[in-house]
Image (cartoon, helix red, strand yellow):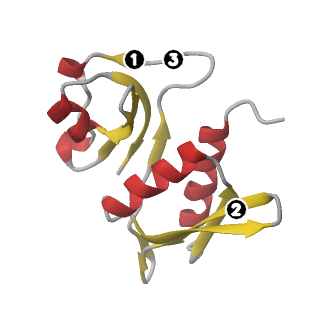
Amino acid sequence: MMTDPISDFITRIRNSCMALKPHCESPHSRIREKIAIILKEGGYISDYEVISNGAKKTLRLHLKNTGKRQAIRGLRRVSRPGRRIYVPAKSIPRVLGGLGTAVLSTPRGVITGVEAKKQNVGGEVLCYIW
């Protein structure tokens, strides 16, 4: 049993990036797929796919890299099971002065910090990507 599946997902991506792997695999869940969509829209990964193996599904991310540099420089889990971090719409954090992306879980779904500011909605800060 896993206590924090989002943290496991982020760690798998971070480890694959540091090892310069072409792709990263993780068990599938809807929230992981939403984070993968945000990573693709932000240009951090080239693509993702859901692989079905009978009853189990796997999420495969195709990482972007150019030589010895990955598109993902860093990932950090912010809110965790022991300490949840919630922010109102007016105080959504900026990552690296706007160069990174904050991922939030809001009542309107998992969205980026920029979209949450546009929609004037707050929520739980899941992670930072830069």
Image quadrant where one finds the N terminus: top right
Q: Amino acid at mark 2?
A: Thr
Which element carries disc 1, helix, strand or loop? strand
- In the rendered structure, are the residues bearing label 3 and label 1 in contact, judged by CB atoms less than 8 Å apart? yes
Question: 90 left or right of 40?
Answer: left
Q: Residue at x 39, y 63 (%)?
A: 40
Which element carries disc 2, helix, strand or loop? strand
* Location of residue 78 in the rendering, given as x and y in whole percent from the top left corner: 47, 30
* Location of residue 125 in the rendering, given as x and y in whole percent from the top left corner: 41, 28
The foreground one among 53 and 80 is 53
Disc number for residue 86: 1
Give the residue furthest to the front: 55
Compared to residue 21, the image places residue 104 above or below, namely above
Quadrant of the image occupied by residue 92? top left
Query: To which residue does mark 3 refer?
Result: 84
Query: To which residue does mark 2 refer?
Result: 58
* Location of residue 127 in the rendering, given as x and y in whole percent from the top left corner: 44, 37
Quadrant of the image occupied by residue 111? top left
Q: Amino acid at mark 1?
A: Tyr
Q: Residue at x 47, y 49 (%)?
A: 34
Nearest to N terminus: mark 2 or mark 3: 2
* Location of residue 64 in the rendering, given as x and y in whole percent from the top left corner: 43, 74
Residue 73 appears in the picture as rendered:
no
Compared to residue 55, the image places residue 102 above or below, namely above
Question: 21 left or right of 93?
Answer: right
Q: Residue at x 32, y 60 (%)?
A: 41
- In the rendered structure, are the residues bearing label 2 and label 1 in contact, judged by CB atoms less than 8 Å apart? no
Q: Amino acid at mark 3?
A: Arg
How far is the residue under mark 2 from the one under mark 3?
27 Å
CA neighbours of label 2 inside 10 A, class few (<14), some (14 to 19), many (20+): some
